[in-house]
Amino acid sequence: MSWPNKEIPGVIALFDVDGTLTPARKEISETMKTTLAALRKKIVIGFVGGSDLAKQKEQIGEDVLNMFDYCFSENGLTAYKNGQQLASQSFIGFLGEERYGRLANFILGYLAKLELPKKRGTFIEFRNGMINVSPIGRNCSHAERDEFEAYDKIHNIRPKMVEALKKEFPDFGLIYSIGGQISFDVMPVGWDKTYCLRHIQDQKFSKIHFFGDKTFQGGNDYEIYTHPDVTGHAVQTPNDTKKILGDLFGI
């Protein structure tokens, strides 16, 4: 254990970003920053998000690496401890160019035939450890995000597309995880948010807390929320997160 200055030894809290620390794709509040700073004095803290670090800097702040003991971007495939980068993994290295080309072509062909009220741009976002697929396109506005989320809840656009991908590529060793308002992640089996736990195994934490809002089966918090080594806390808003932290740690 390498955290001698914490008030409560052997405990770590990991947080999803969207819907847990911040409103979806919006910036963190000053009150949440204050809460996290107080919590960090007591225990080890980290975030685990599906997005890349650039997006997390947009939401949490440019100094995000200094606000947490652990920073797990792309589920921990890009990881930092005390601001220092740890070993990373590559999606394209796992899948290979030929298979990735087949996957991308199928996705773009599926979306070309998909009728939606609105489409924008950036339907596939290529990340280091995964790809993110958005039927409406990641370039949509906040208002259009809200519109698509409501439409998706009625018409199951993302769940249907995930099922089509599972059927088309059963032997690719991939999983599909719906998160946020407008997209889903595609990654190798085992590269969901539980991947970040590999980076903390050597610390022998006696208690691992996780806070997330997509804890339902198929949501991108489900695997870590239900992991046997983790105590999961389901939230709907950042205010829920602050309330539970107050109850647990008196902050």
Image (cartoon, rainbow, N blue to C red):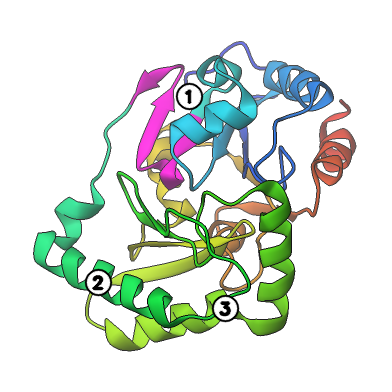
Q: Which mark is residue 157?
A: 3
Horizontally, residue 156 falls left or right of residue 246, namely: left
Relative depth, front residue between 251 and 17: 17
User: Could you say where residue 114 lies in the image, as x and y percent from the top left?
Assistant: 48, 80
Q: CA distance from mark 1 to mark 2?
A: 47 Å
The answer to if 12 sits in the magenta stretch is: no
Q: Amino acid at mark 2?
A: Asn
Residue shown at the point (39%, 37%) measured from the top left: 199
Task: Look at the numbered disc 2 and give the secondary structure of its residue.
Answer: helix
Toward the viewer: 168 or 81?
Answer: 168
Establish if 52 lies above or below 104: above
For residue 203, which quarter of the picture? Answer: top left
Cα–Cα gap, marks 3 and 1:
45 Å
Magenta stretch prevailing secondary structure = strand
Q: Which residues are magenta?
A: 71-85
Question: In the displayed structure, does residue 168 sit left or right of residue 164?
Answer: left
Q: Which residue is mark 1?
A: 1
Which of disc 3 and disc 2 is earlier in sequence? 2
Give the residue displayed 18% in from the left and 57% down from the top: 94
- In three-dimensional space, the C-alpha distance between marks 2 and 3, rounded to whole angstroms, equals 18 Å
The type of residue carrying mark 1 is Met
Q: Tag on residue 105?
A: 2
Q: Earlier in the sequence, mark 3 or mark 1?
A: 1
